[in-house]
Amino acid sequence: MNRTPLPHAVSAPDSSPARGPGRTGRVVLAVVAVLVALAFLLPVLWLIASTFRSANETFASSSSLNWHMLWPEHWTLKNIHSAIDNGFLRNLSNSVIVAALTVVVGIVISAMAAFALAVVDFPGRKFVFGMVVLSFLVPFEAIAIPLAHTFSDWGLTNSIPALVLPGLGNGLAIFTLRQFFLGIPSELAEAARVDGAGWPRIFLKIYLPLTRPALIGTGLILFLFQWQAYLWPILVTTTDGKDLAPVAIAKTFNAFSSDYGRVFAETAVLAVIPAVILLGLQRYFVASVATTGSKN
């Protein structure tokens, strides 16, 4: 009886997942990551260390690479006391108040504007969105001086509203929230409209609860915009009691002498506060930024 010869068995392709780097590769990558992180952290660590030593010791230890660059040889709180005695806490509180008001009011305004641009269909919506995008592409320095003259004519100089108002209409914040709103299924709004819900209710009950990461990310954008502001505060404030912290630090320098130890202490405080906030909320900030290019 003739039998048809069986074809040779074909070995199945290896479907096992590709292996990542071995143990040695992971160790090397970890070492490289630590070295890169230290390279970025060195200036910050040097600044914090300089807060707790005299200015003379800071410059002496920085003349060459040594351990005392990052660890003071003689610890002191003189720089912090000098900053407190010269009213830095008052200037820091001004910065906190201005940043907090900007974040709270700015989130409300930005969220409503973004909702209208993303969900509500009205004539000229694309044109308005184009103006929003253009607004954060134009450098603020280009309009700061004319805007300061306008605020002076309105009698808002040396006031909290003068410091807060320019930060409320932040085009980047509106753009970020709009892109996040576009990622929410439009069927939710359509179903709510069929049930008789108006736009305010849809905004408050459907969209806002779903945009927590984007709202926090927007708040961080507004906070950083105000926290590091220098040009605008110096244009609309003329008294030391109304100065924000960055302006107060700049005024520490004069033509005859400068208290560098005090500057290091004030700068360290000004840098640590946003760093702590960003580290605590970084996952929300990353999530909000990751959605900005999801839809057109």
Image: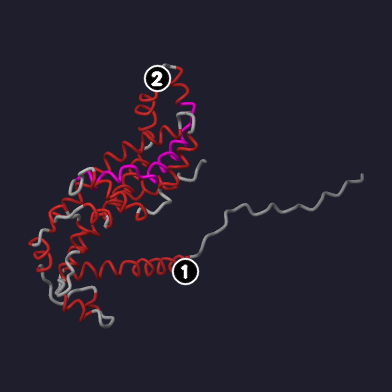
Q: Residue at x 34, y 48 (%)?
A: 221
Q: Which residue type carries mark 2?
A: Ala
Q: CA distance from mark 2 to mark 1?
A: 60 Å
Q: Residue at x 13, y 76 (%)?
A: 74
Comparing 272 with 121, the one in front is 121
Residue 83 badge: none
The image quadrant that residue 165 belongs to is top left
Colour approach in the figure? secondary structure
> Which mark's residue is nearer the viewer, 2 or 1?
2
Residue 24 badge: 1
Pinpoint residue 270: horizontal percent, then vertical percent: 22, 59
The residue under label 2 is 197
Q: Residue at x 82, y 49 (%)?
A: 6
Pinpoint residue 210: horizontal percent, then vertical percent: 38, 34
Could you tell which of marks 2 and 1 lies nearer the N-terminus?
1
Q: Which residues are magenta?
A: 160-188
Q: Residue at x 47, y 28 (%)?
A: 122
Q: What secondary structure is found at the residue carrying circle 2?
A: loop
Classify residue 76 as left or right of residue 224: left
